[in-house]
Image (cartoon, rainbow, N blue to C red):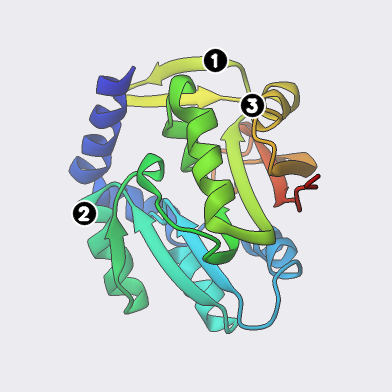
Amino acid sequence: MIENEFNTAKYYDDHAEVFYQDTVNADMSKIRERFESLMPKGAEVLDLGCGSGRDALAFADKGLCVTMMDPSKEMCERAEKLTGRSCVLARAQELDALEAFDGIWACASLIHVPEAETVETYQKIAKALKPGGILFTTYKYGTGEKMRGERFFYDMTEDSLKAIIGQVAELSVMDTWLTGDVRPGRGEERWLNAIVQRVEMEHD
């Protein structure tokens, strides 16, 4: 499935402007506010798979210190133009930070990480979060790996997500809930949302 994942990154490069226009005005404010309520003042936040830069811009406007990261060069360029901030060109699997972020916002981005690499990716996310830090993530609601058109997806249910995150000792699922797609005409699509926390590990 790795090859298909790279084809997915190429899809976003090839269709960047259409995807940008389709998502830049999508209203994620309610979920962002829930995430923001868990952040300390002036929090360091990573927008992991930032896409258009929509959410990074909103976080910055609220006084959060935002880092952007995306595997698509074309999307990085659009996010930089929108926000006036630099964007790290990298996949989620390449995240390499140690206790750097109070929060990681992974909105519709980890959906493209293959099952075989998902646990390791969450381990890297755990390392990148400060103790007590918060991850928000979303998946299309369903089961297993699949191709939708030219794009690779790994769908999740509440149980499958908890099973994956349960393999990472430092992470604990705080809450999950379902929403419709906020984009016009896509409301019938269901998304699994999750708030995950890096917990303090007990040492003997």
Q: Where is residue 58 in the image (x, y as percent from the top left)?
A: 53, 73
Horizontal side of residue 67 vs 74, given as left or right: right
Give the foreground label among 1 and 2: 1
Give the foreground label among 3 and 2: 3
**Residue tagged 2:** 74
Q: Which residue is drawn at 44% across and 16% down?
A: 146
Give SS at disc 1.
strand
Earlier in the chain: of badge 1 and badge 3, it is: 1
Per the rendering, the mark at residue 144 is 1
**Residue tagged 3:** 164
Name which residue type carries label 3. Ile
Observer-nearest residue: 84 or 66?
Answer: 66
Q: Residue at x 72, y 51 (%)?
A: 197
Give the foreground label among 1 and 3: 3
Per the rendering, the mark at residue 159 is none
Q: Position of residue 33 (x, y in %)?
A: 71, 67
Horizontal side of residue 161 vs 65, given as left or right: right
Q: Is residue 71 visible?
A: yes
Q: Quadrant of the C terminus?
A: top right
Name which residue type carries label 2. Glu
Q: Do the residues labelled 1 and 3 touch (CB within 8 Å)?
A: no
